[in-house]
Amino acid sequence: MTDTSPSIVWFRDDRRLSDHPALHAAVERGGPLVLLFVLEDDADRVHGGARGVWLHHSLAALAADIEDRGGRLALRRGPAADVIDALVEETGAGALFFNRRYHEPDRKREAAIQERLRERGLSVESFKGNLLVEPWEVETKSGTPYRVFTPFWRRAKEGMDVGEPLPAPDRLDSVGGNLGSDDLDDWELLPTDPDWGSKMMDHHTPGEAGAKARLADFLDGPIEDYAKGRDRPDKDLTSKLSPHFAHGEISPRAVWDACKDNEYTSRKFLTEIGWREFSYTLLYYNPQLATRNFADGYDAMAWDHDEQAFEAWTKGRTGYPFVDAGMRQLWATGWMHNRVRMVVASFLIKHLMIDWRDGEDWFWDTLLEADLASNAASWQWVAGTGADAAPYFRVFNPFGQGEKFDPNGDYVRRWVPELKDLPDAYIHQPWMAPEDVLADAGVSLGETYPEPIVEHGAARERVLAAYKEARAAA
C-alpha cells in the first residue's frame, strides 16, 4: 500500500527549487509536502549581521517561488528537533528529507533528529545537495584526508561524476489546513536603526532567479577574461556568485553543468569552486577550523590586541588606500573582491599583528556570503596557520598590490573618494606625494585622509620575528 502521508522537506542552506535532491525525492514519494525552514536557536553561528540581511530576502524569494508552484513555505523558529517533532504531530508526516551539512554540530543534530524520527516509524533520507564531492569521498591512497589543495582537487576530479542537475518541480502541493508559520518580519533579520542593510541590496539580487541571472551574465562575457583578469578589482570580471553559493540559491552541480561546454575557458573559475569543496573537507575533519590553528606550531604566536588599530582597519582608515578601499567596499556592499580580501587579511595579521580569528569574526559579521568553511580556511591560508597555507614569511605589500592590480587607481578612487584627484603615481602611496600635489588634490594627510598607521618595512620585520619566535617555541 502506498504511503501518502505528508513529507517534510527541511530547507537550510539550499534555498532553491532547482537541483534540490531532497525536494526532488519528496515530490517523487508522493503525498502533500511540508516545506519548512527553521531559524535554529540551538545552532552555532546561524548567521552574522550581513548574512541575516541576505537570509531575509532569500527566504522571501524562496517563499514566492514556492507560491508560484501552488505551495507554501512554513517558517518556524526554535531548536530544529523540537520544531520538526511538533510538525510531525501537527501534520501526521511520515517522512523527512534534507540535504546534508558538514560541520560537526550540524551532523550531530541531523543524526539525533534522524534517530528520533526513525524510532517513531518515520522514513528519514538525507542527500548530497551542496557539494560536488563530500569530504569522505576524496582520500589519499593511505585513506587519510588531503591537507593540500592541488592534489585534493586533482583526485576529486578524477572520480567525480557530477551528473545532470535536477529540474525544479512544476507543482508543489503543500499540506492543507491552517499550518502555522512565523511572519518573516517578526524575525527582525533586517537592521532598522540605522538601516544599513538596504544599501547592500543595491548591489545584489538574492534568490534563485538572481543567482541564475548572475551566472548567465558572467558566462556571457566576463568569464572569457576571468583567468587573466580575476585579480583586478578595478574591472568587473568575477562572477559574484559567492553569496548565492553560501545561501544555496544555486548548486555547484548547476554551475558545473553550465560551464561544461567551454571547459578550457572555465577551468580557472571551476578551480575556485574546488577551493570551496576543499574548505568543507577541512571543516569536516577539523570542526574548530574557525577558532583553532590548523597548524598548531603557531599556537605560541604573540598577537597584538590593539583595539584602536583594529577599528581603523574595520573602518577603512589605515592610511593604505588599497586596504581602505576593500574595507569600505565590504561595509557598503557586504562583498569584497577576492584579491583585496587577501591583502586586507594579510594587513590585519601581518602588519598589525592582530589575531586572524578577529578578522575571521569580522568577516563573518559583515559578509553577506559568510560561509563557515571558506571563511575560516581562507583566513588561515593568509595567516600561514592553515592547510595549503601561504608561507608565514609572505607579507603582501599593501601599496605594491594596489599598483599591480589597480594600476590606474580606479578601484581606490571609487571607494576612497577623498583621494580621487590624486595623480596615478601617488594614488596608492599618498604619503609620497609632494605637498603641492596633495594640496592640488585637496588631500591633507592626517586630516582628510589618515597617515599610515604602521610603516610597511618595520611591520614586516616585526611580524617575521614573531613568527620565527612562535615556531621556535613549538
Image: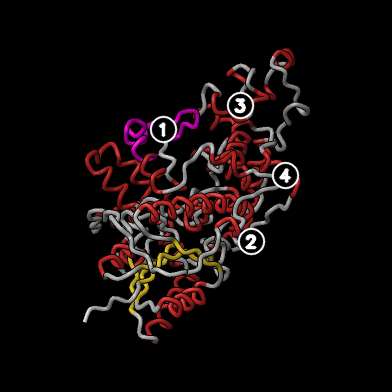
Q: Which mark is residue 309?
A: 4
| CB-based contact (under 8 Å), mark 2 and mark 4 | no
Real-space CA distance between mark 1 and mark 2, rounded to the nearest whole angstrom: 40 Å
> Mark 1 or mark 4: which is in front?
1
Residue 200 seen by the camera: yes
Real-space CA distance between mark 3 and mark 1, rounded to the nearest whole angstrom: 22 Å
SS under mark 1: loop
Q: Which circle's residue, 3 or 4, is located before the other in the chain?
A: 4
Amino acid identity at mark 1: Leu
Task: Name the residue at 42% across, 36% down.
Answer: 238
* 248 on left or right of 195: left
Q: Which residue is mark 1?
A: 237
> Mark 2 or mark 4: which is in front?
4
Task: Name the residue at 60% across, 30% down.
Answer: 415
* 315 on left or right of 393: right
Q: Which circle's residue, 1 or 4, is located before the other in the chain?
A: 1
Q: Looking at the image, is 65 positioned above or below residue 31?
A: above
* Spot occupied by residue 131 in the image (x, y as percentages of width and height): 35, 58
* 438 on left or right of 334: right
Q: Which mark is residue 300?
A: 2
Q: Say which of 131 and 468 sits in front.
A: 131
Magenta span includes 23: no
- Give residue 2's quadrant in the image: bottom left
Magenta highlight range: 214-236
Real-space CA distance between mark 2 and mark 3, rounded to the nearest whole angstrom: 34 Å
